[in-house]
């Protein structure tokens, strides 16, 4: 259940995405299936700065074309000396 304190939380992050296939809104629209031997559909990286308990947390995720091998991800927390 969300409380009033939780509803007012602020998040701040950098997020980067790369689509290997299926991107339809920005040119050039890739179709890298011919040079995509691992079958990756999309990858993204997120670096969280707020809220304070998530500072320096980083998330890396790959989404595959094969739904039986849907996701691989890494989530970790690095100290201030590592950024």
Image (cartoon, rainbow, N blue to C red):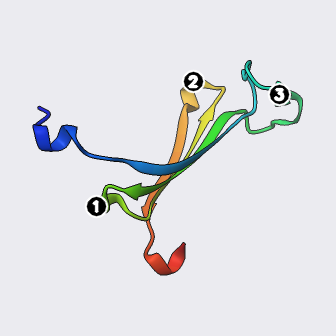
Q: Earlier in the sequence, mark 1 or mark 2?
A: 1
Is 56 positioned to the left or the right of 46 in the image?
Answer: left
Q: Nearer the viewer, residue 15 or 19?
A: 15
Q: Position of residue 13 (x, y in %)?
A: 47, 51
In front of the other: label 3 or label 2?
3
The answer to whether residue 64 is above or below residue 80 is above
Give the CA separation, mark 3 to mark 2. 20 Å
Q: Earlier in the sequence, mark 3 or mark 2?
A: 3
In this rendering, the count of numbered labels is 3
Image quarter where the N terminus lies is top left
- Which residue appears at 63% of the width and 32% of the height? 64
Tag 3 residue: 30
Is 25 positioned to the left or the right of 11 in the image?
Answer: right
- Which residue appears at 22% of the width and 41% of the height? 8
Secondary structure at numbered mark 1: helix
The answer to whether residue 74 is above or below residue 17 is below
Tag 1 residue: 53
Q: Earlier in the sequence, mark 3 or mark 1?
A: 3
Tag 2 residue: 67
Q: Position of residue 17 (x, y in %)?
A: 64, 40
Q: Residues within 10 Å of mark 2 (few under 14, many from 20)?
A: few
- Which residue appears at 36% of the width and 56% of the height? 50
Secondary structure at numbered mark 3: loop
């Amino acid at each position: 259940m969300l409380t009033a304190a939780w509803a007012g939380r602020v998040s701040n992050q950098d997020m980067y995405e790369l689509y290997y296939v299926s991107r339809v809104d920005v040119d050039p629209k890739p179709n890298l299936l011919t040079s995509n031997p691992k079958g990756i559909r999309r990858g993204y990286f997120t670096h969280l700065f707020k809220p304070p308990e998530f500072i320096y947390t980083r998330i890396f995720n790959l989404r595959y074309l094969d739904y039986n091998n849907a996701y691989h991800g890494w989530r970790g927390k690095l100290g201030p000396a590592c950024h």
